[in-house]
Image (spheres, rainbow, N blue to C red):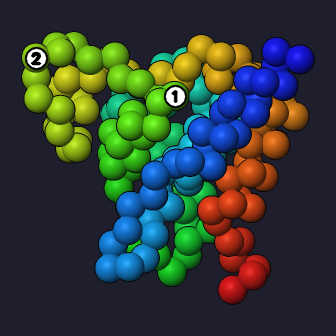
Amino acid sequence: MANQLRIKYYSDAFLKLHCAQVRGRKIFAKPIFVFSVIQAIEDKVVTENKFEYGKGNFEQFREIYKDTYMSYQPNEYLTPIFKPYFHLTTDGFWHHKVLDDNVPKKSSTTYLKDNVSYAYLDEALWDLLQEPSVREQYRELIVNFFLRPKTEE
């Protein structure tokens, strides 16, 4: 029962992802980023709750993000990965382990490389994402709510 409540809690959080608008068009970088996090866990590109910007398996993660973006938003400009990596912290389940709390936060690759040790998910969400059925449920939720597959265009 507790797991079902957690699954619902994060389902609701994903459905409330704030998507920016540019010239009247929604930008789905955050849902695509979350989908990519889930896929990176599935593919074992990420094996611990640490998402280091520009280090470790980051290039593999960036490729997952890019491939996912191009699959679901083929006619859209690819939002640079640093933007959802930075801005997802406003959605409550993605956090940054910063090196110095006194450094002003900026949405830039330089800020992330110099001031963020790594990003991480809520521990409860990380634990849920170890289950294949939960990963699939969340991917379907993101696709059905935010994204349109290439085949539907």
List x then y, in percent, for residue 125: 65, 23
The amino acid type, in three-letter code, at marker 1 is Phe
The quarter of the picture where residue 144 lies is bottom right
- What residue sits 66% from the left and 41% below the top? 12
> Can residue 18 be seen?
yes
**Residue 3 got which mark?**
none
- Give the crowd class for mark 1: few <14, some 14-19, many >=20 residues within 10 Å: some
Count of numbered badges drawn on the protein: 2
Of 141 and 4, which appears nearest the observer?
4
Residue 14 higher or lower than 143, as above or below? above
Q: Position of residue 98 (x, y in %)?
A: 26, 17
Is 68 displayed left or right of 66 in the figure?
right
Q: Which residue is mark 1?
A: 93
Query: Does residue 101 appear to the left or right of 9 in the view shown?
Result: left
The residue shown at (61%, 44%) is: 14
Q: Amino acid at mark 2?
A: Asn
Q: Which residue is mark 2?
A: 102
Query: Can residue 59 be seen at all in this image of the molecule?
Result: no
Quarter of the rendering containing residue 21: bottom left
Q: Position of residue 99 (x, y in %)?
A: 22, 13
